[in-house]
Image (cartoon, helix red, strand yellow):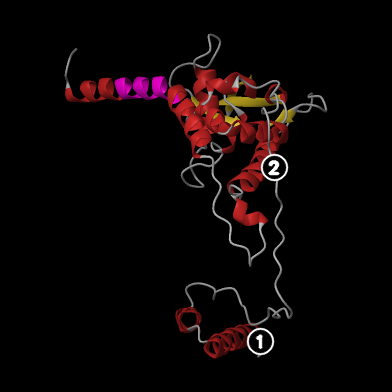
Amino acid sequence: MSWLTPLTLSAMRSFAESVYQVVRGNTARTASTLDAIARGEAPPPELEVVQTPRSGVALTHRLVMLFSGNPAATPGWIDPAQSARASAEPHLNALAARLLGNPASVRCVIEQLDAKTAVVLASKELKLSELQLAPIDFIYAIEGGSPSERSEIEERILYTVARKPDGFPAGAVLRVNPSRQANWGLSDLSYGEFTEVLRAAHRLITASRGLDAVDLNLPERAQANAVDLSEIQTRADRAETVAAPGAREFAIAAQHAHNRESGITP
């Protein structure tokens, strides 16, 4: 009868979890736990009954990073004035450059695959600096629409290498190999290594918010917001100016594509 032991233990754990959620008044969690037991189609939700509540008063520590004066230089990267995001947040762009390092040290290996067998037919290298993006652009281009989709950075890598004079033939099946090559130097980074750094920087920056005067006051002191709207407007206008040509080109290309699909000749 030893075959009953795992099933019995699983039922006991799920029952204990449901009782725990009932005592807490969390009826939705109770229902989902019991439903998982009854159907057996999926494992029950993560057990909270085994998590020992912490006593005492919760205390949240916040890290503040202050910027002033002119933004730091970003050697190895494009001029911040060429990027709408960098124009809007020059200090944040300088911080991203410091976190990510020199893009010329990142070597991206692009492989051409056989469409039927997925065997590697050829490979080429591309330095990340050839994408001509600002550091802050990389921060917001790392995520794809879904886990199965390529990120914007990967799409840009394939787009760039396919249009080089010595690139791949049109219609070739391409992929970015994230692995490190054996003959690289210690200062070289693979695309996979760079994305690990980039994801950490992405989490750091996107989980932060702007600091306000209220954050620096004691709770009992009332302090009005002190946002310099004119300075923000200046940066927003500068970003809009940088982004405008690209927006116009995109609109023209979209119209041409629509005309081709509709059979409209210019």
For the C terminus, the quadrant is top left
Label 2 secondary element: loop
Q: Measured from the top left, where is residue 260 in percent x and y?
A: 23, 21
Q: Is residue 266 above or below residue 153?
A: above
State the residue at coordinates (51%, 37%). 150
- The residue labelled by disc 2 is 66
Residue 80, image quadrant: top right
Queried whether the magenta region covers residue 140, the answer comes back as no
Q: Measured from the top left, where is residue 205 in percent x and y?
A: 62, 44
Name the one closer to the observer, 1 or 13. Answer: 13
What's the distance in space between the residues labelled 2 and 1, CA to CA?
A: 58 Å
Q: Nearer the viewer, mark 2 or mark 1?
A: 2
Q: Measured from the top left, where is residue 251 in percent x and y?
A: 31, 24
Counting labels gives 2
Q: Which residues are magenta?
A: 243-253
Residue 220, image quadrant: bottom right
State the residue at coordinates (70%, 24%). 73
- The residue labelled by disc 1 is 5
Instruction: Please give left or right for residue 151 compared with residue 102 in the image.
Output: left
Q: Measured from the top left, where is residue 219 in percent x and y?
A: 64, 65
Please, what is the three-letter code of the amino acid marked with disc 2?
A: Leu
Please, what is the three-letter code of the amino acid marked with disc 1?
A: Thr
